[in-house]
């Protein structure tokens, strides 16, 4: 995952899919959502770099 910082939010890309950072949790992990509104995928990235993915994308990479 790499992050691009913008004026409004933090954007990232992982395995060809784009995400925005929805929130930073109390344990310093970050919750990311796919930028495509109809897609239900979310990622939680722990401070140690572990990535936990929820659901599967309903579209192809970089189609968002």
Image (spheres, rainbow, N blue to C red):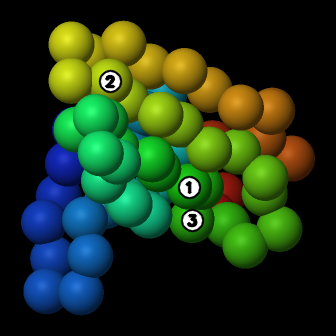
In depth, the one of 38 and 32 nearer the eye is: 32
Left/right of residue 8 with respect to residue 34 in the rendered view: left
Q: Where residue 55 sits: x, y (%)?
A: 80, 33
Q: Which mark is residue 46?
A: 2
Q: Residues within 10 Å of mark 2 (few under 14, many from 20)?
A: some
Residue 55 in the image: above or below residue 21? above
Q: Residue at x 78, y 57 (%)?
A: 39
Q: Residue at x 15, y 76 (%)?
A: 6
Q: Which mark sits nearer the N-terminus, 3 or 2?
A: 3
Instruction: Specify the quadrant that holds the N terminus.
Output: top left
Q: Where residue 45 sits: x, y (%)?
A: 37, 29
Marks 1 & 3, CB-CB < 8 Å contact: yes
- In the image as oriented, which residue stretches furthest toward the front? 26
Pointer 1 residue = 33
Left/right of residue 6 with respect to residue 25 in the rendered view: left
Q: CA distance from mark 2 to mark 1?
A: 15 Å
Left/right of residue 10 with respect to residue 14 in the rendered view: left
In depth, the one of 25 and 37 nearer the eye is: 25
Q: CA distance from mark 3 to mark 2?
A: 20 Å
Pointer 3 residue = 35
- In the image as oriented, which residue stretches furthest toward the bottom? 8
Of helix, strand and loop, which one carries label 3?
A: loop
Q: CA distance from mark 1 to mark 3?
A: 6 Å
């Amino acid at each position: 995952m790499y992050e691009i910082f913008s004026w409004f939010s933090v954007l990232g890309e992982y395995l060809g899919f784009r995400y925005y950072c929805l929130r930073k949790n109390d344990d310093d992990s970050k919750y990311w959502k796919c930028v495509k509104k109809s897609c239900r995928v979310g990622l939680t990235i722990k401070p140690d770099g572990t990535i936990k993915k929820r659901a599967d994308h309903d579209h192809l990479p970089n189609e968002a």
